[in-house]
Image: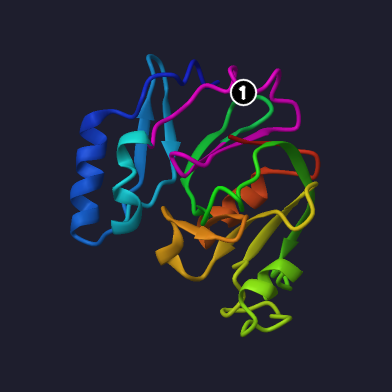
Amino acid sequence: MVKDLKQGIDRRVFLGAGAAAMAGLAAPTLAQDTGSTVEIEAEITEVSRRNISSFRSLDWKPYFSSTRNGAVLVDTTSRALHFWSEDLSVYKLYPTSVPLTEQLTRRGRTKVVQKIVGPEWRPTPSMLKRNPEWPSYVGPGPDNPLGSHALYLSWTYYRIHGTHDTRKIGRRSSNGCIGLYNEHIAELFALTKVGTQVLLI
């Protein structure tokens, strides 16, 4: 079982990951606590590397009263998503994209209400008003801004989803949703269920 995860990611691991990123390679990183090693599936890229100082493991206790049904914490400041399984045997940390502006950012408690592989995308009325050149509908596939998988939240129009445009990760680049690399959303999709609690801070 995962013990207290307050200790940050080992500096030596991040130096190695940073060196790999400089070479243009994906590098998994490890967070270490006093008795166990927790794998963090974090692809360190040029766009997310600048946020590396705040990209660290966290303990679930300051944010949730329990991990019933699993727990997802999205930190919009550090642009990171944390996941804890209900029994605490799994902890994941992923780099994310976050909303472009504070006006588009929503914070608070919600939950996963639907899970879709190959989601369709329809821009909201406000998106179309800001971007009238956008199509009103995009089907599943490589042109879909929701990527390969999507977790629909109880808030209307808000999703945690993948992206085919990997340049967006680590940046303020969305219209309100939280984006992950497709390989990371596929993994998170398998770990979560309808009812998984979500907190955006």
Could you tell me which residue is drawn at 40 percent across and 65 percent down? Answer: 167
Could you tell me which residue is drawn at 28 percent across and 57 percent down? Answer: 46
x%, y% of residue 81? 53, 41
Q: Quadrant of the N terminus?
A: top right
Residue 63 in sight: yes
Tell me if 156 is positioned left or right of 149 in this view: right
Picture layout, residue 192 above or below residue 59: below
x%, y% of residue 118? 69, 70
Q: How many marks?
A: 1
Q: Which residues are magenta?
A: 55-82
x%, y% of residue 56? 39, 32
The local crowd at label 1, few if under 14, some if 14 to 19, many if 20 or more residues have their Cα within 10 Å, is some
Tell me if 49 is positioned left or right of 38 in this view: left
As shown in the figure, which amino acid type bears the numbered disc 1? Tyr
Could you tell me which residue is drawn at 78 percent across and 48 percent down? Answer: 155
* Residue under pointer 1: 63
Picture layout, residue 49 above or below residue 174: above
- In this view of the protein, which residue sits in the foreground, 92 or 131? 131
Dominant secondary structure (helix, strand or loop) of the stretch shown in magenta: loop
Q: Quadrant of residue 168?
A: bottom left
Residue 197 in sight: no
Picture layout, residue 25 above or below residue 28: below
x%, y% of residue 183? 51, 59
Could you tell me which residue is drawn at 53 percent across and 53 percent down? Answer: 101
Residue 75: in magenta span: yes
